Image (cartoon, rainbow, N blue to C red):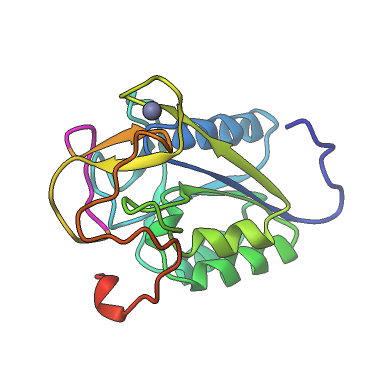
Amino acid sequence: MIYGTPQGTGWIEVICGSMFSGKTEELIRRLRRAQIARQRVAIFKPVVDDRYAADKLVTHDRISMPSIPVRHPREVLEKARDAQVLGIDEVQFFDRSVVDVCQQLAQEGKRVIVAGLDTDYRARPFEPVPDLLAVAEYVTKTHAVCVVCGNPACRTQRVVRRGERILVGGSDTYEPRCRRCYEAPEGVSGDLFPAQSEESLPE
Ligand SMILES: [Zn+2]
């Protein structure tokens, strides 16, 4: 990081961007460096993401690091007691309580690094990431490469016609696109922040 490291306090770092932008890779890079510095590191991942393995972080390039699968953010509190540095991948799959959990851990003096999607396939903010961005000390936006034009990509284009918000998949399901090349799915209005009904947010 280009910043000076805070002394005597914890803090929150957010790594976010579209799919295929190297979020997990960047998370792994930071966590490995902490391990090299002999800090106690704990890594968590929500169970919903079983693309490759629940018990490790795996990048699309198959670089991996062991992780603890959790179903609810409060399990992170219980299992991170001894850690100095915490990593949470795919943080967008947790509910809003993950924000309080991260705040509490940072308050206790821990370095908390979370990685996740900033927007969903409709290009709308993917809660709870917006709230994490607001309370984090440090924010990194990662970019993929637009598959259409080669620009830096900030959007995740779903290339299959499915309407659920959480649809776990890889390059057969999603591709990175820039703002210009991204096409909103059918039936999705151009409103950035439409009133969201509960039905539009399937679990
Ligand atoms: Zn493009």
Q: Nearer the viewer, residue 26 or 119?
A: 119
Please state the horizontal and vertical placement of residue 163, each as a whole percent of the image: 18, 59
Counting from the top left corner in percent of width and height, residue 92 is at 42, 57
- Expressed as whole percent of the image width and height from the top left, the position of residue 167 reads 22, 53
Taking the view exactly as shown, the residue that stands out farthest to the bottom is 198
Q: Quadrant of ligand 1?
A: top left
Q: Is residue 190 above or below residue 38?
A: below
Q: Quadrant of the C terminus?
A: bottom left
Stretch in magenta:
166-172
Q: Is residue 5 magenta?
A: no
- Residue 26 horizontal/vertical position (percent): 53, 32
Query: Which residue is drawn at the image coordinates 81% and 40% (left, top)?
Result: 5
Q: Nearer the viewer, residue 189 or 14?
A: 189
Q: Quadrant of the N terminus?
A: top right
Secondary structure of the magenta portion, mostly?
Answer: loop
Viewer-nearest residue: 139 or 161: 161
- Looking at the picture, does residue 181 appear above or below residue 126? above
**Which residue appears farthest toward the left when viewing the image?**
161
Tell me which corner region of the image, top left, top right, bottom left or bottom right, holds residue 183. Answer: top left
Q: Would residue 202 be found to the left or right of residue 81 on screen?
A: left
- Asked if residue 82 lies left or right of residue 93, the reply is right
Seen from the viewer's position, the closer of residues 79 and 201 is 201
The residue depicted at 45 percent of the width and 36 percent of the height is: 24
